[in-house]
Image (tube, rainbow, N blue to C red):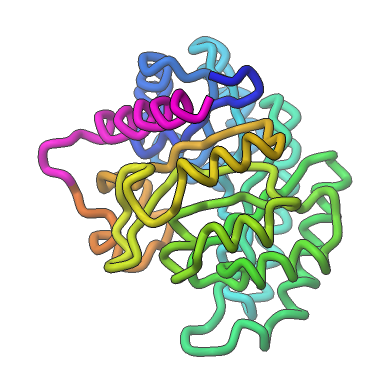
Amino acid sequence: MHKELMISGFSDEISNDFDEQLKSVAQIGMEYISLRGVDGKNIGEHTLEGIKESILPRLKKAGIKVSSIGSPIGKVEVSDEEGFEKQKKVLETLCKACKELGCSYIRVFSFYIPEGEDPNKYRETVIRKIKEFAKIAEKHQVVLLHENEKDIFGDTSARCKALFDEVNSSAFRGIFDFANFVQCGEDTKKCYDMLREYIDYIHIKDAVYTDSENVLCGTGDGKIPELLAEFINSGYKGFLTLEPHLVLFDSLKDLEIKDAQEVIKAKSDMTNYEGFKLQHDTLIGILNDIL
């Protein structure tokens, strides 16, 4: 493993139970997780006191660190002003939590667009709101990482680029999620070429064009092996975060993925732990071939 590449993962895909998550990732040999679902609640629902008094001690005891906070920030309807104001308060809490957790990154989104409407109609609204998020992050010296999630404003490479250019903040950078681009019908190589300079974080998740199903990394249309080689050769240093989506998991209810059972075809012979470990081991194999 290259010393400047670190493997993390959304450990809530293994279990709702946080202690079980920590035990499992340690067993796999990982030192980092992306904190999203903890004891059946999204990290955005936990108080700062709860994070300090319950989550942090367990992380320390297990010897596991946090690569990013997998927040729900930006996962509200673009016109929901009340929801936006609530999310700014949650973001303040999560920025303070970053300091406690020794973490610099919070994963965010760029708002749900009404079905059937042109996302560009909401461009100025999205940019204004993301700028407000970025100001909060700047104040706390935290970096917001935008994920190219399907059905939000920034789900295509062109709209991602527009966000990065117009928000224009060092506190607002990009995640490259291979599967999400595939599920939007995008060519991941073209996405890489357009967005490489903005990317500070990578999700290891793959999918196929035919039915958008999530598949084992390197076996879909995401071009993960080729593009990881390009990332590394271009000087990428940082996290490769496992988000397998190979087996249905409890925290899916918090992710608001439409038709989850269509894109995550539960493998009856595979447990959540086995699916997560398989993704980890396959990624190690890909990296060994590259490096």
Q: Quadrant of residue 153?
A: bottom right
Compared with 35, 169 (above or below) is: below
Residue lying at the far right in this picture: please name it: 139
- x 38%, y 56%: residue: 221
- x 29%, y 59%: residue: 213
Residue 234 is covered by the magenta coloring: no
Q: Is residue 234 visible?
A: yes
- x 67%, y 26%: residue: 101
Residue 286 is covered by the magenta coloring: yes
Q: Is residue 260 left or right of residue 231?
A: left
Q: Is residue 268 left or right of residue 253?
A: left
Q: Is residue 55 left or right of residue 128?
A: left
**How many circles with numbers are drawn on the protein?**
0
Residues in magenta, as a range: 267-291
Measured as percent of width and height from the top left, residue 211 is found at 27, 67
Q: Main secondary structure of the magenta part?
A: helix
Q: Quadrant of residue 118?
A: bottom right
- x 24%, y 63%: residue: 262
Measured as percent of width and height from the top left, residue 229 is found at 56, 38
Along the line of sight, the residue nearer the viewer: 6 or 92: 6
Along the line of sight, the residue nearer the viewer: 239 or 87: 239
Measured as percent of width and height from the top left, residue 256 is found at 41, 62
Measured as percent of width and height from the top left, residue 5 is found at 60, 26
Q: Is residue 90 visible?
A: no
Along the line of sight, the residue nearer the viewer: 142 or 87: 142
Q: Quadrant of residue 86?
A: bottom right
